[in-house]
Amino acid sequence: MDHAVASPFLATQWQILRRDRWLLSCLTWVPIVLVVIIWWIFSQAIVRDLPIGVVDLSNSRLSRQLSRELDATSTLSVIRSYANVVEATEALKSTDIYAYVVIPNQFDKAIYRGEQPQVTTFYNSQMILVGRLINSAVVQAQSTFNAQVEVVKTLAKGQQTTLGAMSHVLPIRTQITPLFNKNTNYAQFLVSAVVPAIWQIAIVVTTIMILAANHRTYGLSIWAQPNTLSRLIATLAPYSLVFVLQGAGFLSWFYHGLDWPMHGSISTMVIAQCFTIVACMVMGSFFFFITLDPARAMSFAAAYTAPSFAFMGITFPTTDMGALAQIWRSLLPVSHYIDVQVSQVSYGLDAYSALASLWPMLGYLLPLGLTLLLIKKHLRAEKKVRSGHELV
């Protein structure tokens, strides 16, 4: 054992990796497989042809025209007409369709009389993103239908040209231009946030496995010599290079391989990733040395990192989160990193302004200090146990 300790530390870590195949897997193919699976799930990128139903109680020319307008949108696809609301509701509950539209009886007659017939859309709002898309597409289709009806009415009153009728019906035209994700690409929107969240979990969990493997190999009293902090750094430093390669790898894949829009600098994001890696490894070390029990440390890590994606502020605005959620978010390294990523990918901020959001990461010096205190506490406990055995 003395000879192993005296040998170059990098070589000893390689020997640990060769013996611990699961640790080697977590450093190599497991993160890659997880990332590829996430990308494959959202690989279609743009949501199209969501199946919906129509309950046409009017069965008239205008009601059929409205159904065609709904089907003509790129987001919706009318796959079936239902005889009544009960059948449509059952189809919605069984997820055969995502929504159904009810066109009331005498729909066309109400329009001709100048009344306002009510067309009702029912959808499952538990599927938040799908619900937003359906709501937007239905409003778009109904607006187009309303404009067409009003143009016909205006022409019937003697308006000479179609352009003049359209100007009368729509005196103001509105152009809504989406920024930063013009095509509503869900792969670009979700995968670019989910992958860093998984990467954070992988770093924290793998750090626990690294320390557990070294603890099994050397024991705490031998491993922690001659200096606790220097030995912790020497143990984790070689693996940090692997995490840097992983982070730079998924950035290159996103913004070079998949050619997603990039308005800033990848090098700035890599710098932010380095700070994130250090913070994640600090937290992994802290969880392990709380009990020196890998299983319990994994439980702490799971509870700590599980809300990563939800608390990033990508799918839900940070300003609307509760105080507890905002505090938890500030404790997650990936939350600070994602601010830098968004500022570079979407806004193209300069490096100084983007990296300024990493200042709160200085707070991870506290768990680092607690980790060193915990190691010393465990060393004293081991020393007392050895002294007791020697006395016996």
Image (spheres, helix red, strand yellow):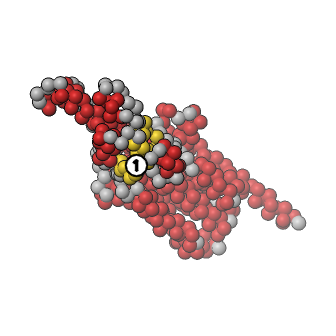
| Residue 289 in sight here | no
Task: Indicate the quadrant where residue 178 lies.
Answer: top left
Residue closest to the eye, 224 or 95: 95
Residue 253 spot, x, y in % from top left? 35, 59
| Residue 364 in sight here | yes
Q: Quadrant of the C terminus?
A: bottom right
Considering the numbered disc 1 on the image, is that residue within a helix, a strand or a loop?
strand
Residue closest to the eye, 117 or 385: 117
Residue occupying image coordinates x 17% and y 29% = 155
In the picture of the structure, the residue carrying the numbered disc 1 is: 81
Residue 17 spot, x, y in % from top left? 55, 71
Amino acid type of the residue tagged 1 in the rendering: Ser
User: Taking 151 as reference, is 303 left or right?
Assistant: right
Query: Alpha-carbon neighbours of circle 1 within 10 Å: few (<14), some, or many (≥20)?
Result: some
Residue 168 spot, x, y in % from top left? 19, 25
| Label tally | 1
Task: Indicate the quadrant where residue 388 lies.
Answer: bottom right
Residue closest to the eye, 296 or 110: 110
Residue occupying image coordinates x 56% and y 38% = 325
